Amino acid sequence: MTRETIAAIMEKQRRYYASGATLPVEGRIAALKKLRQPLIDQEQAAAEALRRDLGKSDAESYMCETGLVVSEISYLLRHIRGWTKEKRVMTPVAQFAARSCKKPSPYGVTLIMSPWNYPLLLTLDPLADALAAGNTAILKPSAYSPATSALLQKLLGGLFPEEYVAVITGGREENEHLLEQKFDY
């Protein structure tokens, strides 16, 4: 993928984030549910990709990768409403007439570069966290796990628009182009 293509994806994601589309909690919940269901439905395809890339058995694929991601998403869904609420904090005496609060807010456009050894887990767990926090995400799976990278591109490309979640495959050249960009996190 070229430098210009990556910059264009970044710009699309910046505009999408700036539109406020990622902020509503209901939208975040919908995105997490949208991510979880294909993982359950495509468990065998994920196991096959992990077998081709790393020689993992079906049990190891589920216990160390797919099952952990599904568990993380379920945990996020249970707690997201509480995490996104505004929380009151003590007001300094100098501002005695005011009310003080902390309100969690997302960073913006995030980059998730995953290694080869746990390609599904270390790509989708941070993605679930980024979506729950209200960010957009650009994913760069490892070039050393091509079957899993192809599965992720197929799976996520059909789930989310590129301005929300984009998967960039490739090797060192794509890594360099990505690292030249200015990400919010």
Image (tube, helix red, strand yellow):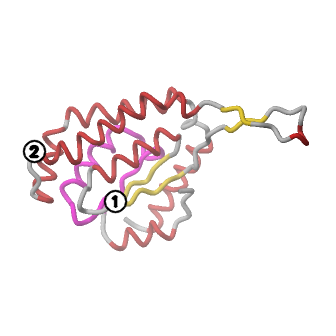
Comparing 37 with 75, the one in front is: 75
State left or right for residue 79 relative to residue 97: left
Q: What range is drawn magenta here?
A: 141-169
The answer to whether residue 74 is above or below residue 152 is above
Callout 1 secondary element: loop
- x, y percentage for residue 98? 86, 33
Instruction: Tell whether position 60 is magenta.
Output: no
Callout 2 secondary element: helix
The residues tagged by marks 2 and 1 sit, at their Cα atoms, a distance apart of 21 Å
Question: Of label 2 and label 1, which has the lower sequence position?
Answer: 2
State left or right for residue 1 relative to residue 52: right
Label 1 crowd bin: few (<14), some (14–19), many (20+), radius 10 Å: many
Residue at left offset 45%, top offset 50%: 137
The answer to whether residue 117 is above or below residue 48 is below
Judging by the rendered image, the residue that carries numbered circle 1 is 114
- x, y percentage for residue 171? 31, 69
Comparing 56 with 159, the one in front is: 56
Judging by the rendered image, the residue that carries numbered circle 2 is 58
State left or right for residue 23 relative to residue 48: right
Three-letter code, disc 2? Asp
Residue 42 sits in which quadrant?
top left
Question: Tag count in the figure?
Answer: 2
Residue 100 sits in which quadrant?
top right
Residue at left offset 49%, top offset 30%: 27
| Quarter occupied by the N terminus | bottom left
Residue at left offset 50%, top offset 70%: 180
Three-letter code, disc 1? Ser
Instruction: Tell whether position 167 is magenta.
Output: yes
Q: Which mark is residue 130?
A: none
